[in-house]
Image (spheres, rainbow, N blue to C red):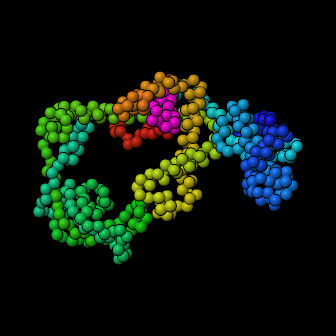
Amino acid sequence: MKVNVEKIENNVATLKIEVGADEFEKALDQAYRKNVKRFNIPGFRRGKAPRKLIEMHYGPEVFYEDAAEIVLSEAYKKGVEENNLEPVDHPHFDIDQIEKGKGVVATAKVAVKPEVDLGEYKGLEVEKMVYNVTEEDVDKELKALQDKNARLISVERPAQKGDIVIVDLEGFVDGEPLKDGKVQNYPLELGSKILVEDLEEQITGMEVGETREVKVTYPADHPNKELAGKEVSFNVTLKEVKEKELPAIDDEFAKDVSEFDTLEELKQDIKNKLEERAKSFAESSLRGSILKKLTEQAKVDIPQAMIDREIERLIMDFAFQLKMRGMDLRQYLEASQLSPEEFKAKFQDRAYNNVKTSLVLEAVAKAENIEVSEEELDAELSKYAESAQKSLAEYKKGLKEENLAHIKDRILTRKIFDFLQSHARVTEKVVERIAENEGEGEEEQA
């Protein structure tokens, strides 16, 4: 058996496979033993007919397909290992010759992991977003705590902004009842903008027991296509008005809402947590900036097979999230009015970016010999073992192989970012607020 790599072009490896007559004969015999029970030859019990008789009856090629699969699978595996190839898809075989007494000659083509041109990955000019926590931030958190612990007291007066009102709502479009547009005893905080703002404003000023027709025009870009750009009439009945009675922010308040005895201790704890969040935000923004610069300058021709596989993974994750919310993918596609092809296309760019990110970080690790030692892995696992109240050995024994690989990948990704950061030229930029989800998921994605 001989296997040679003829060429590798456009990330497709072509392997020439030659299997001798003797090896093919052995494979034919294996194929015969595998399939003999399928044949019913007169004069022989099922599964007992000789191979030569079956070949005479059905033709000499009757076992060729299975025999070819045996020898070509073995030859392909040998060729991949000997030539250090990294296939990213299933191979495609073209058989040039297959004949008893002569053997098999075939060509295998398979997409392989591409080479990455990293460019100048050291000395990247990147930006780190920095947020400085202020006393106003602490006061805002305190007020949120105060609001959360407010008492609700029923009042006999017209509803006003900030009140919690209990209402019955029934909506109509063009005189027809709105689908799922009737709700009773709905609690609403006026001014929260949970509902359309115009609706909340028109409820303001109503009195308990009053019913009012309220007309609202929904914006053209409203996610509910049934309502987008349309005027909707609501019959609103106000059933109860409750106002918030806020507790005083003092030492007693601190004792009630936390484990601290004084307001100053509570404020310091809030400040510490906000500063931790600001630090995490800064680190995430830096990782995001590094990753953006790194992937933008790197050049790599990604086989579609890798992107398709990532799309499948993303769709599986999406379907799982839907299932957690009591919906399946078919229902989602019907509600979104998307064909399977349109839905799949929505993941194309994200899948491409995910694959490119993974390849680029892997290339950095390879270029700089960045690896995860057993000591580093054990140190990380010890943290999980401690949380699970187990010994390290017990925890490792209960880990699945894929979970262990995932943890190892996380450590490796962290080390790659640490290396890139230590060699980057970092400029700090003070921002006025912490952007939601800024830089989030960079390590997860990688």
Q: Residue furthest bottom?
A: 175
Q: Is residue 201 left or right of residue 104?
A: left
Instruction: Give coordinates of residue 415: x percent, y percent.
Output: 49, 27
Compare residues 365 and 404 and report the one nearer the observer: 404
Location of residue 7 with respect to 211 vertically, above or below: above
* Quadrant in the rendering for residue 89: top right
Compare residues 247 and 298 and report the one nearer the observer: 247
Compare residues 328 and 423 and report the one nearer the observer: 328
Q: Residue furthest right?
A: 101
Location of residue 352 with respect to 196 vertically, above or below: above
Q: Looking at the image, can residue 443 be seen?
A: no
Q: Is residue 329 left or right of residue 434?
A: right
Specify start and end residues of the magenta stretch as a single range: 396-416
Instruction: Give coordinates of residue 244: x percent, y percent.
Output: 16, 52
Residue that appears at 54% across and 56% down: 343
Q: Main secondary structure of the magenta part?
A: helix
Residue that appears at 52% across and 51% down: 315
